[in-house]
Image (cartoon, rainbow, N blue to C red):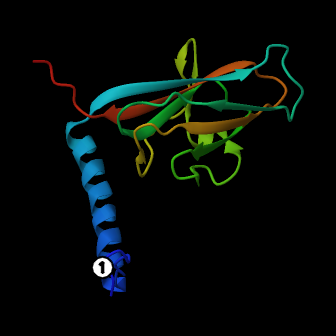
Amino acid sequence: MRDNQPQQLSQSDILTGIDKQIQDRVDRIEYLKKYGETYWLPVSLGIASGPPAAGTINQVISNNQDFDLLIYAAFCTLRLSTIEIIDSARSRALTNGTCPIPAIAQFVTTAGVISYPFEWEVPYLLPAKAQFKITVTADGTETGGTLVFKCKQPPVYQG
């Protein structure tokens, strides 16, 4: 065998590598659960004032961060429109198609939270530099809209 030929990995080596990646992810989630600090990730949903016709679709992208975020709750000022959320890093759909916003986010008005408070059953790890692609389908009566994700970020140490 020549020295410049790539080394073939065995199936066992490949599975060991995958197992390590899975365990690293699980460890990162547990670390953020235990030591993470609260971080709020707001996203303006940008439903045009008017309000737009029912079925109007608007797509927005969340800001990316230089650190992992463990997302475990969401709040939204819209409740009648539907939403689809996709993680840009893995092209993973968090909502598996469009769903009613109150299915994933508590409804909030200027008077406060109006729906039953809940945290997600399983938190979601959004990797550093990843973004959410959010598609909102207007119901025809709502305008504006802000979706805020409640997250845990890695601890910030002040020296």
Query: Can you see residue 136?
Result: yes
Name the side, left or right, on which 29 lies relative to 145.
left
* Circle 1: residue type: Asp
Name the side, left or right, on which 85 lies relative to 68.
right
Residue at image x 33%, y 82%?
2
Q: Residue furthest right?
A: 53
Instruction: State the residue in front, 3 or 137.
Output: 3
Q: Is residue 2 placed above or below 22 in the rendered structure?
A: below
Instruction: State the residue in front, 11 or 156.
Output: 11
Q: Position of residue 82 (x, y in %)?
A: 72, 38
Q: Is residue 96 placed above or below 66 in the rendered structure?
A: below
Q: Position of residue 59 (x, y in %)?
A: 71, 33
For the C terminus, the image quarter is top left
Q: Position of residue 93 (x, y in %)?
A: 60, 52
Residue named by callout 1: 13
Residue at image x 31%, y 84%?
12
Image-quadrant location for residue 105: top right
Q: Position of residue 91 (x, y in %)?
A: 58, 52
Mark 1 crowd level (few <14, some 14–19, many ≥20, 10 Å Cα): few
Name the side, left or right, on which 158 lies relative to 94.
left
Q: How many marks?
A: 1
For the N terminus, the image quarter is bottom left
Query: Can you see residue 117?
Result: no
Image-quadrant location for residue 103: top right
Q: Residue furthest bottom?
A: 1
